[in-house]
Image (cartoon, grey):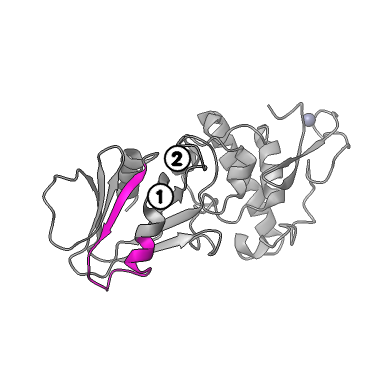
Amino acid sequence: METIARGVDARVRGDRIAEAWFSSHREPFKTPPGRQVKGLEGRIILSVHRTGKHIVCELRRPASGSLSHKDASPADAQWIVHLGMTGRLLVTTPDAPLAAHTHARLRLESGKELRFVDARRFGRLEFRELHRTAAFAGAGAEPLTVGADDFAMLFRGRRLAIKAALLNQTLLTGVGNIYADESLFRAGIRPRKAAGRLTRAELERLRSALVEVLEHAIRLGGSSVSDYVDAAGVKGFFQLEHCVYQRTGQPCKQCGVAIRKVVVAGRSTHYCPDCQG
Ligand SMILES: [Zn+2]
């Protein structure tokens, strides 16, 4: 599964869906085909990743008046492919022979075509608009178990601030505001640095810092990370000795410089201007 999602990602990332076609079978569709066509056509594929037994395509409409595929806006929709027992997602060209049981074809601007083939029709195709529906549950990687390579893949090519990327639940599950600030401090990374510009060494420091901070939170009384993710991200974490979170103006515990507060992705963000990048 992982290999499939990565292979598709490498070949269609940044491409735009020119035209979508669905078979007339009813079974494979969790969202009616007409709605999927309407949602998919014109959208850009930001990334493709695996979540459990699903492959999720993160999508976005180009900003109005601009056909630039490269601005850093977040996904506004998801196309979710449940492969079931026999489903396959293929990247091919429109002239390639059509396999029996092809239920969906997305013609891409680059000339490629993405196809969903499922002989047993147990697969499921779903389209979600993220302003109406929550992002696919558990869509993000699990920060306590994600490997170094997968962790690095999450941020590759992304222009959004690393702080915003850490809070994005479609990338990582369960990283609240405090965890993000405290992890970035421990890793020595400026919160507004573009996620895609982090070096491999920085990414590895960040992954270790996240594990350290989250495991600390769990030891303080939770059975899982999700126990600690409430709206404010505060629950259960008050006992941890904060290095930066809500210490605006106080001296950094490592260097003595005053901690600063900025807003990133609409969330208050605390960092040491000296220790972090
Ligand atoms: Zn400092």
Q: Residue at x 32, y 46 (%)?
A: 18
Res 153 label: 2
The amino acid type, in three-letter code, at marker 1 is His
Q: Secondary structure at mark 2?
A: helix
- The C terminus: image quadrant: top right
- Is residue 54 shown to the viewer in this render? no
Q: Residue furthest bottom?
A: 27
Q: Which label sits in the foreground, 2 or 1?
A: 1
Whether residue 67 is visible to the viewer of this picture, yes or no, is yes
Q: Position of residue 216 (x, y in %)?
A: 68, 53
Residue 159 in magenta stretch: no
Q: Which residues are magenta?
A: 16-36
Name the residue carrying label 1.
49
Amino acid at circle 2: Met
Q: Quick one: SS at disc 1?
A: strand
Position of 220 with respect to 4 (left or right) is right
Q: Is residue 265 left or right of residue 103?
A: right
Whether label 2 touches label 1, CB < 8 Å: yes
Seen at 55% across and 55% down, the residue is 173
